[in-house]
Image (cartoon, helix red, strand yellow):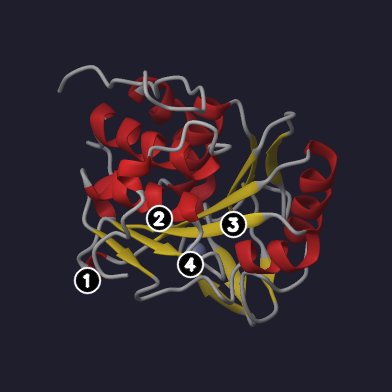
Amino acid sequence: MGTMDHGDRSTQVKAVSVARHHIFDLKYRLGDLRHSAIREAMVVRVRPSALLVLAPHSVTHHRGGREKAAEFWTGAVAESVAEAFGGSLISAIGSREEAETAASDDAFNELARHVVAATGARWVVDIHGLAARHQVDINIGTAGCRGDNNVTRSVQSLERTFDVSVDTPFDGSSGLSRSLADSTGVRGVQLELGTRLRRDAVTSADLNALVDGLALLVADGRSADSALAMPPRGW
Ligand SMILES: [Zn+2]
């Protein structure tokens, strides 16, 4: 795979290292993926950045009292993306207790609101795992940002590398990005990642194509290219 051309982006990002990505993931595998010794423990990095990346289901969690499986690799993907952007990060390293949905109020959501307020973040990317049966690489839940120019450009970029579906099967309307948009005014999307981006053999090219697509999401628009103004397939 060739070197990514990062020259035409208005947002500066660093290339993702696959070796570092694997090291990020190790901590989510502790305790048989069931949680750290501390319930609701989180990995938190707070940086003055336009981007906050979330991975609320990176380890086994509970919803309505029932155990839900860890969404493998989502913690590492969130960390690699956050690091590429110098962005802020919150991932779960201890089991969350969600009353009804991922957006049900708890310590994770409360912290996310504080981080948005403290950093001035303008975009939230909420990363989840999508079951292989859906047969897409990335499902973007626009959570009320459908039609946003940055979302459109980001989808177009991601479609060059991945099978992308917009708002199917998940539109993000009951997720964290939507609830943070409502409570803080930040814009956000929910990214449901298929197995291509959540496996031991994930490639550097794929991880960097994800980062490149997200760079267009968080871009400030000053270098927007009119050639990219057409809506993507399926919109
Ligand atoms: Zn999830």
Query: How many residues crowd around disc 3 within 10 Å: few (fewer than 14), some, or many (20 or more)?
Result: many
Amino acid, disc 4:
Arg
Percent from the top left, x then y, of residue 23?
A: 45, 26
First in sequence, mark 4 or 1: give its number. Answer: 1
First in sequence, mark 4 or 2: give its number. Answer: 4
Label 3's element? strand
Report which residue position mark 3 lands on.
Answer: 188
Amino acid, disc 3:
Gly
Q: Is residue 198 visible?
A: no
First in sequence, mark 1 or 3: give its number. Answer: 1
Report which residue position mark 2 lands on.
Answer: 152
Label 1's element? helix
CA distance for labels 4 and 3? 10 Å
Task: Give the foreground label among 4 and 3.
Answer: 4
First in sequence, mark 4 or 3: give its number. Answer: 4
Instruction: Pick whichever, 201 or 220, lies toward us.
Output: 220
Residue at 70 percent across and 54 percent down: it is: 186
Query: How many residues crowd around disc 4 within 10 Å: few (fewer than 14), some, or many (20 or more)?
Result: some
49 in relation to 150, above or below? above
Tell whether 135 sits left or right of 101. left
168 in relation to 161, above or below? below
57 in relation to 79, above or below? below
The answer to whether the residue labelled 1 contacts the one labelled 2, judged by CB atoms less than 8 Å apart, is: no
Report which residue position mark 1 lands on.
Answer: 133
Report which residue position mark 4 lands on.
Answer: 146
